[in-house]
Image (spheres, helix red, strand yellow):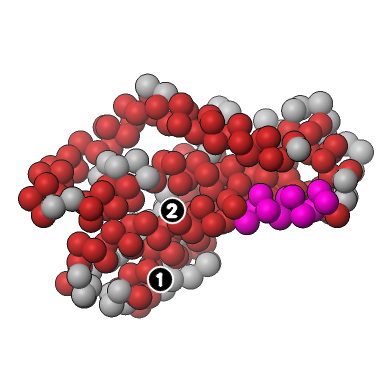
Amino acid sequence: MNVVTLVISLFVLLFAITIHEAAHGWAASKFGDDTARSMGRVTLNPIAHIDPFGTILLPLLLVIVKAPPFGWAKPVPVNPFNLRNPRRDNLWISAAGPMANILAAVLSLLAIILIKAASPGVSVFLRSFLTGRGGLSRGFHPLEGLAIILFYGALVNTYLVVFNLIPVPPLDGSGVLMGLLSEGAAQRYERLRPYGFLIVVGLIYLGVLSFIIRPIEIIIYTLVFL
């Protein structure tokens, strides 16, 4: 992986994690809990959300070994006693982060399509750059640079959506699922929490995440290469 790709991937990941956490905090405030807002977590300033391992070290290691870059930030604090309907509201608070990433991915792809329409040469550049047959030695037009950033924006935000929607505590997918379950079933499901990290690691090791992500990657590459 060249230095340009490394820097862009990490920059985009930092942005994706920031909007993810800010969306959680914003949703919590809308449902009556201003804990995150009072702590300065409803912001697009990435410094407020950085976790040294999950935001910096892990993504850097993943990019170096050519694995899909993903990570996490400091969890946004939510006080359920401030929510009007804790189980229902927590479902939407949990879903807000992935929804923000889905929106960012879709907007990135739409922007690439518009850029290619405005400058057809961008398509040729993207194809050569992303297939490894081209580089930046000849220099590149600002629109080509923007297209690269948007491409990785779509890709990284997609990785975060898939990862966070795994229905295993403490990931967002578990909060969504618990809001859909009956109270008794949710309590039984909560017993998985102490084993959540091990389950997630197991899913990654077994290639389950890659199996889910691969078809989405193909769709993104197809849209970019059209």
* Figure check: 175 above or below 131: below
Whether residue 75 is in magenta: the answer is no
Check disc 1 and give the amino acid type: Trp
Q: Residues within 10 Å of mark 1 (few under 14, many from 20)?
A: many
Q: Nearer the viewer, residue 55 or 18?
A: 18
Read off the residue under disc 2.
98
Give the left or right position of residue 76, taking residue 211 as reference. Answer: left
Read off the residue under disc 1.
26
Q: Residues within 10 Å of mark 2 (few under 14, many from 20)?
A: many
Which region is colored magenta? 107-117
Q: Nearer the viewer, residue 141 or 63?
A: 141
State the predominant SS element of the stretch in magenta: helix
The residue depicted at 33 percent of the width and 70 percent of the height is 28
Q: Earlier in the sequence, mark 2 or mark 1?
A: 1
SS for callout 1: helix
The residue depicted at 61 percent of the width and 47 percent of the height is 154
- Is residue 9 in view? no
Q: CA distance from mark 2 to mark 1?
A: 13 Å
